[in-house]
Image (cartoon, helix red, strand yellow):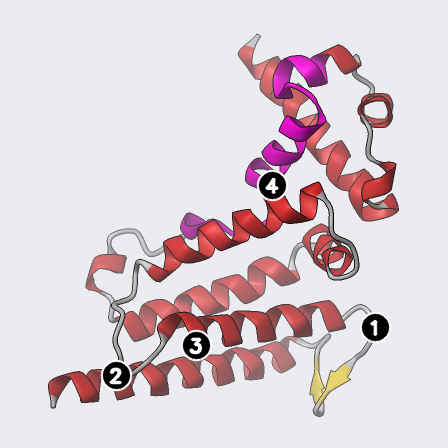
Amino acid sequence: MERDREKTKMNILQTLGKILAERGFKSIGINAIAREAEVDKVLIYRYFGGLPGLLEAYAHEADYWPLTEDLIRGLDREVESMTQTDLAKHMIRSFCHYLRERPLTQELLRWEMVESNELTSLLADFRETEGLKLMKFFEQNKDIDINALATIVVAGIMYLVLCMKHINYFNGIDLHAESGWERLEKAAALMIESSLKMRERNSSQ
């Protein structure tokens, strides 16, 4: 019974994502979601309490944005022994791959740039919460603003991923080729490595 409940909830969340990607926020409504998901709308109220609860659940449960565990997956206990530089480089590579492999997330991010509503606010708050969780892995230091550095790197990656829909090249880098993204990942890693090593040198003086 519990398995059926979870399956139905996930179906509803996936249907919401599909409608958002294809038709935008204005097409969202309990009746439309229930009809497309082929469920009784009573279940949406029962499982989520209504549309606001459904939107909040989507922001948190629909695999929309990488969680901390997504970005450090595969490291296991290595996280504790890794340098902050190597950990940051691993997270950036993971973030690149996560975002590039999720067309729905890309569509939602593009849509967020031109429309403000209840869901865009929830998604932005969710990203902010997860981003601050990641920052706890890194020691703060007056010489290097790690939050600002991460913001520039992450925002740059997001922008280039979103550009892929309309352009092929950016500054001669092929955004549709793995080799192009390898170059971008190496450049981001170098930026992080240079900054964090500079911090380490300043701290030791």
From the image, tell me which residue sits under label 4: 59
Residue farthest left in this picture = 205
From the image, tell me which residue sits under label 1: 166
Mark toward the viewer: 1 or 3: 3
At horizontal 52% and vertical 76% (from top left) the residue drawn is 152
Occupied quadrant, residue 8: top right
Q: Is residue 197 magenta?
A: no
What is the C-alpha distance between the residues marked 1 and 3? 27 Å
Q: Secondary structure at mark 3?
A: helix
What is the C-alpha distance between the residues marked 2 and 4? 35 Å
Does residue 186 sit above or below 114 in this rendering? Answer: below
From the image, tell me which residue sits under label 3: 149
From the image, tell me which residue sits under label 2: 199
Instruction: Give the amino acid type for the residue marked by disc 1 in the picture.
Output: His
Magenta-colored span: 43-71
* Residue 30 image point, x, y percent: 80, 24
